Image (cartoon, rainbow, N blue to C red):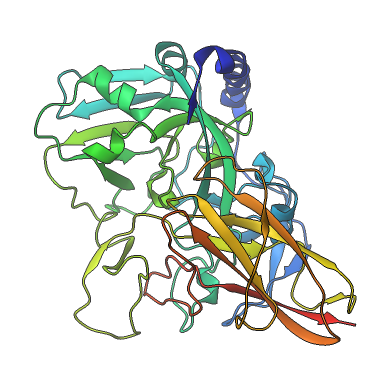
Amino acid sequence: MRSSKSQHESAARRSLLRAGVLGAGALLAPRAFASDSIHLPLPGGPDGRRLTDAFPGKAQMVLQRTRPPLLETPFAVFDKGVFTPVDQFYVRWHWAGIPTTVDAATHTVTVSGHVNNQVRFTLAELMNGFQHVELAAVNQCSGNSRGFFEPRVPGGQWANGAMGNARWVGVRLRDVLDAAGVKAGAVQVQFEGAERAIVPNAPNLKKSLSVDHARDGEVMIAWEMNGQALPVLNGFPFRLVVPGWYATYWTKALQHIRVLDHEDTNFWMHPAYTIPDNWPQANMTPGQQGVRFVPINRMVPRSFITNLVAGASVPARRAVLVRGIAFGGDAGVRAVQLSTDGGHSWRAAELGHDYGRYSFRQWQTRVELARGEHALMVRCTNTAGLQQPMTPNWNPGGFMRNVVESVAVTAA
């Protein structure tokens, strides 16, 4: 994480100006949907998805659901670079009652609960009152790749595009909490955004971190991603950034921060978003009884081939470039390896620039393939020594899939 208030002041001012424009009328009613589709086969179907550019601030996206919006990044986007374009950064909301207009001048976040002084900040007050920091970090939905779970589980049937990488600019959550004065005996910090259920008595989305985690100096409140103000669909005017943890904690359109002197037992901490208590596997057998579940937490390493798709034809006995992206989850990328023989042997790939332990990292290598069909497999090992598994996990939430990916190609 880099901190330099002078470095980001001009960008912050530009963001605030853009925020004012957005706040004047950022309606989220989608335009007419396009009829384009993409081949995206999942084990339980469907074999394709509709593409849409109907949502304000978004280019072409894979449409999972319209209300609340679930928009997946087309996978080809990840071959364009380390940082995911803002207009194709995936979107995931839980409740249909999401903000359709936001006034950047009046939207506030309140810090209350087990503190010495309740405080409230507008976007401008956050920008002007605290040191600015920048951090590159992957935001990944807990259920990214859920559509590949077998047996199938309920929930959004994402392929691999419910993730994105950005440079986030904002302020340390620790500094904001210090302004309120966290009292001795505090246990957790709870976060709540602006989305609301339209079903009576349904619980607002609230997520909590331990006090020590919330004050680790890396968790931040961000208003900017990849040099732009957050789009409304991605949490304008500011959202929580929890590097190395799944996106369920990255509260959008943040409104309330509550310091608790007890463990948070609200629905969204348990039973929702829980995994078998055997991290990093998060694995169980369908129908297994007596499994202890805990709230989902740290991400695990993943890697992908981005320049070749299943069924691609490549020249035989000639050097073929294979490239992609990897990330280490809650740690950096130590190594990326490629196999051309079903995982029997592995060769090291060349790693691209390191933008920090929480960022995507590009990789590439060249291979020569004999004529015929080949399964190209890629795996990442993070700096903590954790390596992607060869067999997929299963749990009823469809969470934390990180099996070694395979792309079938034909050399001719």
Front residue of 205/364: it is 364
Res 85 quadrant in image: top right
Question: Where 220 sits versus 328, above or below?
Answer: above
Front residue of 313/337: it is 337
Residue 74 in sight in this render: no
Question: Where 128 sits versus 286, above or below?
Answer: above
Q: In this view, does 395 lie to the left or right of 209?
A: right
Image point 28% across, 40% down: which residue? 213
Question: Where 66 sits versus 232, above or below?
Answer: below
Quarter holding the C terminus? bottom right
The spot of residue 397 in percent (x, y) is 38, 69
Front residue of 346/300: it is 346
Q: In this view, does 7 lie to the left or right of 32?
A: left
Image point 35% across, 31% down: which residue? 217
The spot of residue 324 in percent (x, y) is 69, 59
The spot of residue 389 in percent (x, y) is 48, 74
Question: Where 237 sits versus 28, above or below?
Answer: above
